[in-house]
Image (cartoon, rainbow, N blue to C red):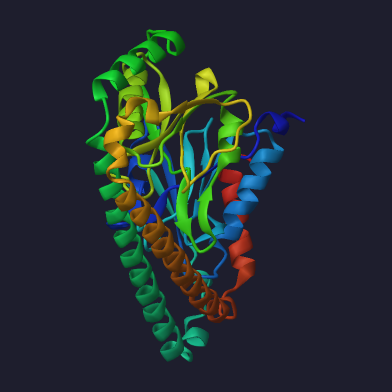
Amino acid sequence: MESSVHPSVDFFLGATTPAGFKGYFAPLRREPGMQLVLLKSGPGCGKSTLMKRLARAAQDKGEPIQRIHCASDPDSLDGVVFLRQKRAIIDATAPHVVEPEAPGADEWVLSLYHTIDADALHSHKDEVTALFARNQLLRSRAARYVASAGSLLLDSRRAEACSANFEKVRRYVKRLCTRLLPRTEEMGSEELRLLSATTPKGEVFYQGTVQALADKCILFRDDYGAVSRLLLELIRAEALARGYHIITCPCAMHPEDKIDHIIIPSLRLAFLTDNRWHPVRLSAAQTVRCSRFVDRENLSACRARLRFNERAAAELLEQACALMAQAKSCHDELETYYRTAVDFAQVDAAAAQCMELFGVG
């Protein structure tokens, strides 16, 4: 079947970071030619189910897609990107609210609010309001644990940076890119996706996406992140300058200033960061130990500090995941109230409309 040519490609477009929720839904709409369908409704009202139906139908027709998962519940979808069509459908509700800038021209709003029986829901107003508040409280507490872990990991990165030979890193990248990235006549372009996130299930890393998009992988083994940060920054700049379309995957813990992975689909090539937070297990990968760029004797003076940071960050993230799991349970309870108030026949009608819109009906 043609669909076998397009295996499942999974990403996140948002995650809880040390700075709070960070989403890449706005950059998605800025991708050249991209048109968005903005899906609006309440919890448990069929948004994820609708998008899963779209994704399955698209794959059955051999359409290349990206599944965008929800970091608060990786089993749910926050979106589906139709690569050939340059269109995407996304959950445009909190915490990643997206409003149309040019309704009908660049975005189409698909509201399912009309499927909710407000009178039926109003009788549970107090319970629903309390659950929304508790969900937000738990998510905020989880974010504080993530922020604390992020501070410790940043401290470790800075410690490694003091012992790193960055000029040696630059020379290595020049040689690597000359060998692997021949210059093209194209204009470089980029899409931003997350390959990993802290979730109620722990740290989730979509290794299958790498296997679907790349045959050759260069694996940078870096426990602390300073060397891989510069490696990936330089590789990104070279790939764009040489005319490649790349998928840049920021670090979910420090998305503003650190890249974890870069995938170049046209070359079936990936550059990946491997560490304890998202270990990569690819037997055919070429592993580069970042310790080769570090003065190990100098770094050894920080060994106790680094070990403490790693242990403490792991415990903080474990607690963050537990709080996220509680928030998910709270959200699941919210969904039970909404489900009883939704007319799913109308949701099915909207799904059929979407199928037709995306040509997968």
User: Would you say 137 lies left or right of 217 here?
Assistant: left
The residue shown at (42%, 44%) is: 36
> Who is closer to the viewer here, 203 or 37?
203
User: Would you say 55 lies left or right of 19 here?
Assistant: right
> Who is closer to the viewer here, 253 or 222?
222
Q: Residue furthest right?
A: 1
- Horizontal and vertical percent position of residue 30: 33, 37
Instruction: Work out which quarter of the rendered image holds the N terminus and state it.
Output: top right
- Horizontal and vertical percent position of residue 153: 32, 50
> Who is closer to the viewer here, 13 or 238?
238
Decide if residue 196 is in sight here: yes
User: Would you say 305 lies left or right of 279 here?
Assistant: left
The residue shown at (30%, 57%) is: 18
Give the quadrant of residue 134: bottom left
Decide if residue 101 is in sight here: no
The residue shown at (32%, 29%) is: 294
Give the quadrant of residue 213: top right
- Above or below residue 307? Residue 265 is above
The residue shown at (26%, 49%) is: 155
Instruction: Work out which quarter of the rendered image holds the C terminus and state it.
Output: top right
- Horizontal and vertical percent position of residue 2: 73, 29
- Horizontal and vertical percent position of residue 349: 62, 60
